[in-house]
Image (cartoon, rainbow, N blue to C red):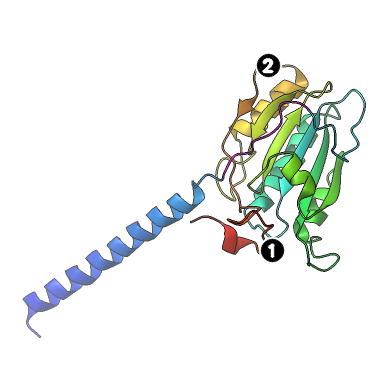
Amino acid sequence: MPRIFRWFLAAFIGSAWVAALVIGATELWRYDSAEGVPASAPLAWPADTHIVRQHGLPELVVLIHPKCPCTRATIGELGRLMTDCQGKLAATVLVLHPANMPAGWEKTDLWTSAAAIPGVSVIADDQGTEIRRFGAATSGQALLYSADGRLLFSGGITESRGHSGDNAGRSAITSIVLGSAARPKTPLHTPVYGCSLFDGSGACRNNGSQSCPR
């Protein structure tokens, strides 16, 4: 094989390899940074919700799909948030349980991890009734309500899909709860990252990662 041909072949293979890496990295970045549909959350605590609030404490509601891999990071951030808030915040995690799914289907590792966090209550949400009351559409949606029932924050508590670490959502909630920031006159918002909770027809999704937008 002529030397110049071998050189061109090596250069072609090297260029193709670099191009594949760039394309792969770009697709991964696009996936990680793809925002979910934000909640249309009620500005006042829903009167018909079955969540029992703790008197005198702001309430954080986190709405999740039990089979969304992206939401593991959200639960990890929730644990850090509850530690940082030093008992001054109550939290409820609503876990979607679609119709026709067997009992216990929703009790995945996400349920177990959330239930292990001090100050957090975990509730199975049959057919997404409560999730709809709170207007959520994406797993990992967090909603903070004041002690008197006013919406203060709506968004995600991760910086991107499935990634833990410092982020605007967790920082905003911590600042509001601890009083290091003034209570906002209108709700603060951050992007939310996770699987869709409902399909195009409005029915609860019964799968996890396959429902993540790509």
Whether 167 is drawn above or below 209: the answer is above
> In the depicted view, which residue is nearer to us: 200 or 146?
200
Q: Residues within 10 Å of mark 1 (few under 14, many from 20)?
A: many
The residue sitting at 19% across, 70% down in the picture is 12
Q: Are marks 2 and 1 in contact (CB under 8 Å)?
A: no
SS at circle 1: loop
Overall secondary structure of the magenta stretch? loop
Of the residues shown, which amino acid type is indicated by label 1? Asn
Of the residues shown, which amino acid type is indicated by label 2? Ala
Q: Residue 102: image x %, image y %?
A: 82, 69
Find residue 190 and report its image quarter: top right
Which residue does the numbered mark 2 point to in the structure image?
181
> In the depicted view, which residue is nearer to us: 94 or 130?
130
Q: Residue 155: image x %, image y %?
A: 63, 35
Find residue 58 and report its image quarter: top right
Residue 206: mark: 1
The verdict on residue 181 being magenta is no
SS at circle 2: loop
Q: Is residue 169 left or right of residue 47?
A: left
Q: Is residue 109 left or right of residue 24?
A: right
> In the depicted view, which residue is nearer to us: 158 or 14?
158
Q: Upstream in the sequence, badge 2 or badge 1?
A: 2
Whether 163 is drawn above or below 206: the answer is above
Give, as a single range, the part of the protein colored magenta: 37-44
The residue sitting at 19% across, 72% down in the picture is 10
Q: Residue 93: image x %, image y %?
A: 79, 45
The verdict on residue 40 being magenta is yes
